[in-house]
Amino acid sequence: MTEQELFSKNLILSTEFDRYVLEHPEFVAKIPMNAQIVLLPEDDSELCQKNIEVAKAQREPGQAVVHVYIEKVAPQLSRLINPSVVSHN
């Protein structure tokens, strides 16, 4: 996996995690303050392993670690409503 692929996949995961937390605030109550959150998509074993490696390297001494297992990410649908295009020459 290239660095760009790692970045792109984790960008999607972290964005979706943020959305989930906003919609389910009770979920975040399970996570200790200042914990290192490691997102582990169950349908991508290579990304899981990479995220665990990166987390180990970046963990602060004494910092709690929380693994968030993600079964899968649903296909992304646009949330735009009635967009329009206007060309200006």
Image (cartoon, rainbow, N blue to C red):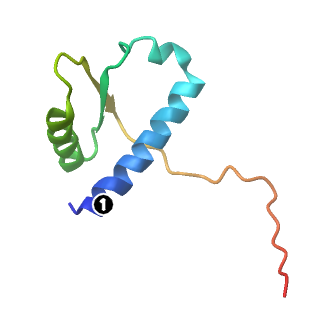
State the image coordinates of residue 37 (x, y, percent, origin top left). 32, 28
The answer to whether 3 is drawn above or below residue 53 in the figure is: below
Question: Residue 48, how many percent across, how many down?
Answer: 22, 41
Instruction: Give coordinates of residue 11: x percent, y percent.
Output: 41, 49
**Left-right relation of 20 to 34:** right
Tell me if mark 1 has few (under 14), some (14-19) or many (20+) residues whose alpha carbon lies within 10 angstroms of its own.
Answer: few
Q: Is residue 20 above or below residue 65?
A: below
Residue 7 vs residue 84, the one in the foreground: 7
- In percent of the image, x 52 and y 30: which residue is there? 20
Residue 88 lies in what quarter of the image?
bottom right
In-image side of 20 versus 85 (left or right)? left
Query: Which residue is at the far front?
Result: 61
Please name the residue that numbered disc 1 is placed on: 5
Q: Residue at x 16, y 42 (%)?
A: 49
Q: Which is more toward the observer, 55 or 30?
A: 55
Q: Residue at x 18, y 49 (%)?
A: 46
